[in-house]
Image (cartoon, helix red, strand yellow):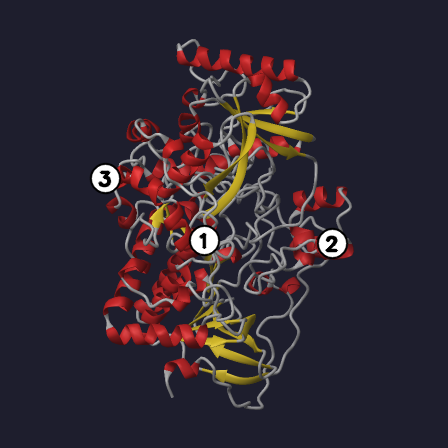
Amino acid sequence: MSKTEMTRRNFVAAGSAMALALAASTALAEEAPAPAEGEGAPEGGEGGGEGGPGAGGPGPMGAPKDVPAAREAAAAEGRTFGYAGAGDWLGVPDDVEVAEEINDFDAVVIGGGHAGTQATLALAEAGAKVAMCEKSTYLMYIGEDAAAWNADFVKNAGFAEYNLGEVINEFTTRSGGRVSQEIVASYVNNSGECLDNMLACMKEAVEDSERHDLYNQLVSDLALTNNEYSSEGGAYAQDIDESFYTYDVTRNGKIIVQAMFDADKVKELTADIDWASLAVDPNCETTEEGYQAGYQALYDACASFYDNNNQCLDHTGYPKAPGTKTWATTIQMMGHFHGREGHGGVAASSILGNVQMACLAKAYTLGAQVFLGYKGYKVVQAEDGTVTGVIVYDADADRYVKFNCKAVISCAGGYIQNADMCWALLNELQEKYERTGGLKEDFNGGGMACAGDGSGVKMLCWAGGFVDPSPRGHMSLGGGPSGTWGANCHLWLDENMQRFCNEGNITAAGDACSRKTGACYGIIGGDYLKHIASCGLEHTGPNFGRPEYIMDMMYDIETGEVNSQIKITGMTTAERMGGGIYKADSLENLAAGLGIEDVEGFVAAVNHYNDLCYACQDGTYTCDPEFGKNAEAMIPIEGPLYYGFSGSCGRTGSSPSMVTMSGVMADKNLNVEDLDGNPIPGLYCAGADLGGRYGTGYSTPAAGNSIGMALTNGRVAGKSAAAYLGL
């Protein structure tokens, strides 16, 4: 029987039953003995001396704990112990009959997504016998971009090597200090090696004929085959070649790096172009072939963009720091260029799934196996908490199977699909949602079958782990005016023609918008390249990593009719976006075009902002004196042309989207910790099951961090588990 067939096998029921190794989580922690006088106080005093938080008496660090009483109190209030949210979202595991025991593996990975695949690969590379269990009947890899710090791939593309301590500090600052700095540091320091290894696996799958055949077999047997990946032109429908691991910003390239353009260089390269005279057909067919024919004259006019290692791109001007810091470090496996209208929706052309399947092919050659339709249920532990196995549910056979193993890594995707858990744990978002009439049953991310249903988090908590304390992050940063280049640091005005935040601090600016109501507006001047180039490379921020995106945007702006709304083909992160801005020859006409009634107030607000910009330029101020925006991003809004776009603010609530940002607490090795912060032997987590990654929201120094962290943390967890196994 082949290894691929093994992934589909149904095990014969053995008819044996076993009791669960541990009872409900309410029995996991026993009462801690009260410390002797002074015992447990910080060094420097005996509970009453100087030198620690406990000074002056039995303070927070030295206070005795009565855990059983606290558990009883939480139960009486209808809460899960250790959490403020209402309702017992955790419950206790049922006693289940185990139909079969499997003794073939050293470690089991729960979840076959980004983190699970990389954990499986790392274990297999270390020599472990590893099984990967995925609850779905197929493998599906969502997304296309992953932030990888100081990856050789990025440096070889011409980008600088970065100070990783500065990056780690920026993560921590954006989170309000509410991250595990050790976990963030582990991700930042290991992400480059992880992504380089992934692309090396793809190269091996391309160049080695046997690996190539195995890759094709795995795609056929394991991957989701009814989505855009496998449709005509989709990534799975294409035979892999060197373009699947090579940096190439041309139309045929499939992998680029999110980057900003060099505004001065682009001006120099386009100074002699008469945009209006280019033989471009804007009404061409919206297909790849139609675009190539209709816009070839534009491509030819801007051919010099690609000279001297893509000289139009900014390779060295990082971090971009209009308010928060961002770096060009996100590897985008978006597939080849599909023209101005994009292709099939978000990540439809992504080759990240192909790269992951190549990684899995390598793991298979090292003995790893995949079990589809197997959902993690309960970690089995010895009396001292040491992992001895894991029980999974085999949906196809409607039975439970026990894997006897020494290490378990949970990468089950968090709890975005579990409304009870979201309602109880995402307290800030829950409050906002309820205030607008939202109901609990609608409070979940829904949609993607591969998203987490909370089973992995529950499994870890039943084993003794705890979710990050509140407030817990979610993937939402508020509203604001967004141009076709996405999140930006331009002048923002509210409906009363008042500036209200540091527009360059995207984390805080989004929250500022949520505290406003009505419309808001973004304004830039005639030197639009300089304005755009000052923006950070945020999540949902601008991306001009393909020179053709710069050409398209410039052509649309330069040839758009004055005093009218013009359509712009822009680029936000890794998505081909259409949108529009208003182009005017005066501030008064811009106000009219944006529907602003208080024209006088609008002009006065712009002029006031310009005064601040001039004062920053002449050295009067070292930064924006109103909200602290970096002086380099304080660019005067000057003519002869002006551009504007609108958005909305509001105290509205929304359900959580995509993935949860909080998870189970772990140490720097991603070893799950118990109530007292002690590592649970043999138990690890990664992906959205892991806590300590974000603060109150998804705000990061580069786009692609949720996926980048999942990939890297999966690999780190796999290596940590291998070390625990003595490999």
Q: Quadrant of the C terminus?
A: bottom left
Q: Position of residue 342 (x, y in %)?
A: 47, 51
Name which residue type carries label 1: Ile
Image check: 99 left or right of 429?
Answer: left
Q: Nearer the viewer, residue 613 or 227?
A: 227
Name the quadrant containing residue 634: top left
Name which residue type carries label 3: Asp
Q: Quadrant of the N terminus?
A: bottom left
Which badge, 3 or 1, is on the more N-terminal residue?
3
- The residue that disc 2 covers is 440
Element type at mark 2: helix
Front position among marks 3 and 2: 3
Q: Nearer the viewer, residue 708 or 312?
A: 312
Which badge, 2 or 1, is on the more N-terminal residue?
2
Image check: 205 left or right of 225?
Answer: left
At label 3, counting other C-alpha atoms closer than 10 Å, the crowd grade (few under 14, some 14-19, many 20 or more) is few
The residue positioned farthest toward the left in the image shown: 308
Element type at mark 3: helix
Name the quadrant containing residue 166: top left
Give the spatial CA distance, label 3 vs label 2: 55 Å
Q: Position of residue 557 (x, y in %)?
A: 46, 32
Q: Nearer the viewer, residue 349 or 140?
A: 349
Query: In the displayed structure, would residue 602 be above or below residue 348?
Result: above
Element type at mark 1: helix
- The residue that disc 3 covers is 307
Q: Which mark is residue 303?
A: none
- The residue that disc 1 covers is 707
Give the spatial CA distance, label 3 vs label 1: 32 Å
Name which residue type carries label 2: Lys
Q: Nearer the viewer, residue 143 or 319?
A: 143
